Every structure is written in structure tokens, then in C-alpha cells.
Image (cartoon, rainbow, N blue to C red):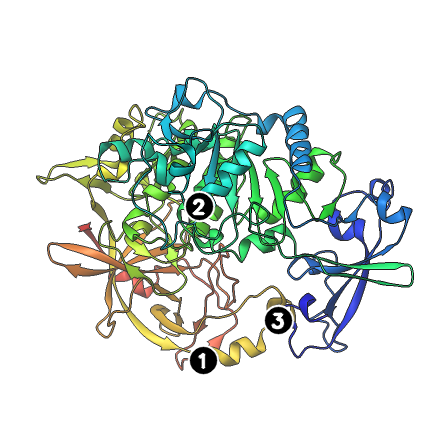
Amino acid sequence: MEFLKTGDLDGKHCHLQALSSSLAILGREVRASERKEHSDCTVLFPVLKAKSDDKTEGQRIAKDWQDAGCLALVKTGDHERLLGIGPRQISLSVNFSLIKSWLGHCTEHHESCKILSGGSDYVQGLRVIDCKSGNTIEAPASCNYLALSYVWGRSAQSQSPGDSGNSERSAVKFPKVVRDALEVTRSLKERYLWVDQFCIDQNDGPLKSAQIAQMHEIYSRACLTLVAAAGENSSYGLPGIGTKRRLPMQHFIIDNIVITQMRPHLSAQISRSTWAGRGWTYQEGYLSPRRLIFTDHEVAYLCNTMHCAETVKKPETLSESEKKADTTNFLDIIPSASGLHRTFDGLDNERWHQLKQKQLPNYTRRKLTESSDSVNAVFGLFRTLESSGIRHIHGTPIRRVSPLAASHWVEFCLTWHHEVVAKRCPTFPSWSWSGWVGGIRMSEPDIRDSDVREIALVKEYGDTIPLRDWFDNEMPCPNSPSTSASQVLRISATTVWVSFEEKSWVDLNEKSSTQSQVVGMSFIDGTHAVLPIREDITALPYAYMDENVSLDGGALGLILQRKCQKWRYTILLLKQNGDHYQRIGLVRVSSWNKTRAAAIGNSDPPMVYVNSEGIPVDEFTRSDETPLWLQGATEETITIS
């Protein structure tokens, strides 16, 4: 049972949970009546035994097996062969007949996964590898091609193969993952394969930049993307292809029962891979509508509508809503781009909020060999959002509040914050997430240019262009790289000097309610801003620092507040850096008048109020008077780089 137990269960009192395979695999989203239409079996997996006192570690069923897998109990004979939902035994090599059946079902039934043919007609300078000759060639007109998404690693070769020579001599220059991908392409009766390392000129220059700017077309127009989610570099290959074998499924028989080890859910396998931790692969998964994923355990198919795995039998005839629920486990690691080629009311807002709340936060947690690639590696994602009126300046999203608004207001995502101290990337400005190496959250309200007296970009010779004018000029030119925009931002707004204290909230966290503990709500220890409300009440919001700097003398705070949200403030923390200021952190000031904890990513931050003796108070009565910390505020025009 050791291989079924996740690390968080070490030393815990557990018991075996038994479920039907239909409930464990399909989940509760699928109606019980529909689950009963398919023959299933029993699966076993360990879960925490419920505590008898406060039930904070109650049993979680239906999805507990996904991180570590489970044991399937299947009767021998006809039941094993006719099983509709349960384990499927696999060989050491890939089952291409099964893969072709998945692709055929997707082609016939999934409108959102429709292949956009003619990549060479839409991608200027597209090159592909010819699987017959092994040479890299200009893509023939309207050719179908597969794409490869993989981790280069240290073994990656910098040179591209030549355009001449026999197939064996040329193919040997490719790393194993590319050679295996060529074999997959041939086995699926296709001829051309696109691999970034060998189909893009790797020398910095206009050719490379032009191809990077077309990544959204390259991946979205591939008839299939091969995802190498096994190994740490390009020498590992694709398990199940050639000499690279998969890890076998363990099984044994007791009386007339076959006990089979079912692997962790595909999303758990991918999330632990090196591939899922790399920056460039994020948009590659997002942009590809049809993905064939290779892990050490199996091959799986994930399109924008469903996912199928070699080791799991399940029906392909689920409803659209049930298939959507089935693919939600993948959204953090391979976000779905199914809405790229369809329209509906509210789509623009949905894309905007997904970008802020999911896509950029998840992307910034990934690793890049070169931090200067942080915008390029997600440029294809931004290109897909242009139809929704979304642009970016050095990676920071910007959009018009309403395309029909006569005021032409724009929203700008300046109010992101780091969860932990990050590392500065001087290639980009400090006010953008791209200017740092570290994961971010975008929990605060967007800032509109109407919320401050002025927000503008400072040009090379000191001239300025208001943000809304920059946006109007950018809209007709979507191909122009926004990274060429000025890195200096000029803002005229309210400023205040902020002082700080180090605080620990051990007692507060111990007193938190059971419900707060269960959902992960807590008070954060560390640096807090000191914001007196009145003589007897002081607010102590947590300071989300971008870097470790001395705050002994305090720091300048730039106040960004939506006019429609009284008492809710976002304070950018700044330090002098030559002629400009540099961002060093952010303070989130809640509009609540209660001391309350918050979970990570919560739209409302944790907030502690203390009395004149420094003792936390549960609640206070707020008046309409201006808080003391704001009474000394002044209007200033500052520049941030």
C-alpha cells in the first residue's frame, strides 16, 4: 500500500475507502443514473480517519485517489473484458490504435477542437521537419503538421540540422525526444513535425522575433501537439516509443479477483513533471487545442473538451457539461483555450478575469532559464486576447473599460503582489510583474486612469503619452511588441509616508475558528504597515514585499483607490532609485472594520486592528472622518521605472 499513500498522510491515522470506479473516475458531476449504465468495479485508496472532536480532517472521497492512485478490484473472466469504467492494462509500447480512436472521436464530435488547417498560409516563414527525409524545410502550402512541446534541458543542441543528407544521418542530430516525436508523427500517418529548437533560427534577430510573435498561430494550427511530460531534458525521449519503456502497472490475483494498481490522475502526473514547471511550456499547452501527453506511466489525450488515458476505461459519450467538469483538474497546468474561436456575451470579461486570476499567477510560478524571456514566453497568450481588446505593456494587462464608453477609460493591472520576496529582473520595469522573478497574485481591483489625476508613459526625451492615448495607438498595431514601450511610468496621485512594524499573530491564529482553519484562512506573520485610524485604533495590514529592503525609516506609499470603493486602498511602496522611484512592495488595505483572517488569493486581504495598547480588537465603529494616516497625505507627481 506504500505506493498509494501521499506524503501528507505520513504518520496519520488512515483507513481504506471503497468506492465504485464510476464514482471515483467520473466524479459526482456525472448523474448516478448515467453511471449505472456502465459496468464498473470497486476501487480502494487510503483516506484520513475522521477526527471525533472537531471533524476538521473529515473524509474526502471521490478525488482522494487522484494524487497517489488506487487499487481496482476486478473479477476475472468476462467482467474484466466487459468492464466499462475501470483499469485498462497496457503494454510497454504505445497503443496507436487507441490514440487514433480518440483523435477520430474528437474530430467528429468536438467543435471547439476543430483543426485550423493551413499553418504555412498563416505563419510567415514557417519551417517544419520532414519525417521522410529528416530535413528541416520550408512548410509546404496548407500542410498539416504536429508540434512538439518539451523541455530542452542542458542536453539541448544549439545548432539546427542541415537541409541535406540522408534521413538517418540527419535524424541522428536530433535529441531523443525529437526522434521519438518523428516516430509518433509517422505512426499517425502524418509527415511534418514542428519543433521550436530546430524550426526557429536560434540566433537573436528579426527572424527569431517574428516566429515568437506567431507562436499563437503555430500551436493553434497544429493538428496535434505532442507533450513530453516525462524526464528532465530532451535526451529522455517519449516513454512507450522506441527503446523508452513505460513503468508497468502492478497487478496480482487473489482467488478470482484481479487487483490492479491504477496510476494517479493524469493531472497529478503532469503537475509533478519538469515540463509543468517550465515557463515556455505554459502557453504551448494553452494554445494547443489537441494534446497527446506522454508520461512515464501512460499516454493520454487532452483536448479542449475531454481527456482520455490509456490506463483508464471510461465512456466517450459524456455530456458537454460532464466533460467540462472532467477537464477542470488540468486548468492550473494546462489552461483551456476553448473560447479562442467562439464568441458569447461576457467573453471579454471572462478572458480578462482568467488572465488576472489564473493564467498570469500560474505562469509566474514557473521557471525560465533566462528571466529576460518572461514576456516572450507568454506573448502567444496575449496575442490570443487581442480580439477581446486586451493588450499589455511589458506584460502588465491593459484594456478599455468599455469599447462603447465615450470617456475612453482604460484599466491597468498595477496592483499585483508577490506572496514571498522575489528577485529583481532589470530587463523590465519594477512596476510590472515581468520586472521580477517570482509568483504573483492579482487580487486587488483594477486601477482606471480616471482614478488618478494622471497616468502616462514617459518617452525617451521626456515627452509623455497618457495611457489611454498609448492604448488607442497600440490597438491598430497588434503585431508591434509592447515590450518596446517606455519603461518609465508617471503617475499623479495621493502619496503618504508609511511606517512599518514586524508582527507575529500566533495567538490570533490559534483562536481562529475551525471553519477558518479548514479553508486555510490565517493571519500572516512578518512586516506590517502601521496605519492609524484614530487615536485608539490602528490598522496593521500585511506588507507584501517585492524585495528585502530596510524599512527602518519607512517608505513612500502611492495610494491607488477606485473611486467607487470607499475605505478600500492599494498602496504601492516605493524607494528612490536615481531620478525615478522603484517599486518595492504593496499594501492591501481592506474596507472591513473587523479583524479577519484571509486565505491566499482571497480578494479581501487579512486585516488586524489594534487598540492604543497594541492589543487586537475584533471590531470597531468606523466614522466618516478621514483616517489619521491619510490626513498627512499629499498630491504628488512621481515617475516609476
Q: CA distance from mark 2 to mark 1?
A: 49 Å
Looking at the rendered image, the disc whose residue lies closer to the viewer, 2 or 1, is 2
Tell me the kind of residue under disc 3.
Answer: Asp
Seen from the viewer's position, the closer of residues 348 and 409 is: 348
Tell me the kind of residue under disc 2.
Answer: Thr
Looking at the rendered image, the disc whose residue lies closer to the viewer, 1 or 3, is 3
Q: Which of the two discs, 2 and 1, labels the residue nearer the N terminus?
A: 2
- Residue hosting label 2: 281
Seen from the viewer's position, the closer of residues 364 and 193 is: 193
Q: Are marks 1 and 3 in contact (CB under 8 Å)?
A: no
In this rendering, position of residue 385 left or right of residue 51: left
- Residue 237, relative to residue 592: is it above or below? above
Image coords of residue 93 (percent x, y): 63, 46
Classed neighbour count for the residue bearing mark 1: other residues with Cα under 10 Å, few (<14), some (14–19), many (≥20): few
Quadrant (top left/top right/bottom left/bottom right) for the N terminus? bottom right
Seen from the viewer's position, the closer of residues 369 and 10 is: 369
Residue 353 visible in the shown view: no
- Residue hosting label 1: 615
Seen from the viewer's position, the closer of residues 328 and 517 is: 328
Tell me the kind of residue under disc 1.
Answer: Ile
Q: Which residue is rendered at x = 40% and y = 67% of the image? A: 542
Q: Are marks 2 and 3 in contact (CB under 8 Å)?
A: no
In this rendering, position of residue 286 left or right of residue 69: left
Q: Which of the two discs, 1 and 3, labels the residue nearer the N terminus?
A: 3
In this rendering, position of residue 28 left or right of residue 640: right
Q: Which of the two discs, 2 and 3, labels the residue nearer the N terminus?
A: 3
Image coords of residue 367 (percent x, y): 39, 55
- Residue 308, relative to residue 222: is it above or below? below
- Residue hosting label 3: 8
In the rendered structure, find residue 505 and report the number of the disc placed on it.
none
Classed neighbour count for the residue bearing mark 3: other residues with Cα under 10 Å, few (<14), some (14–19), many (≥20): few
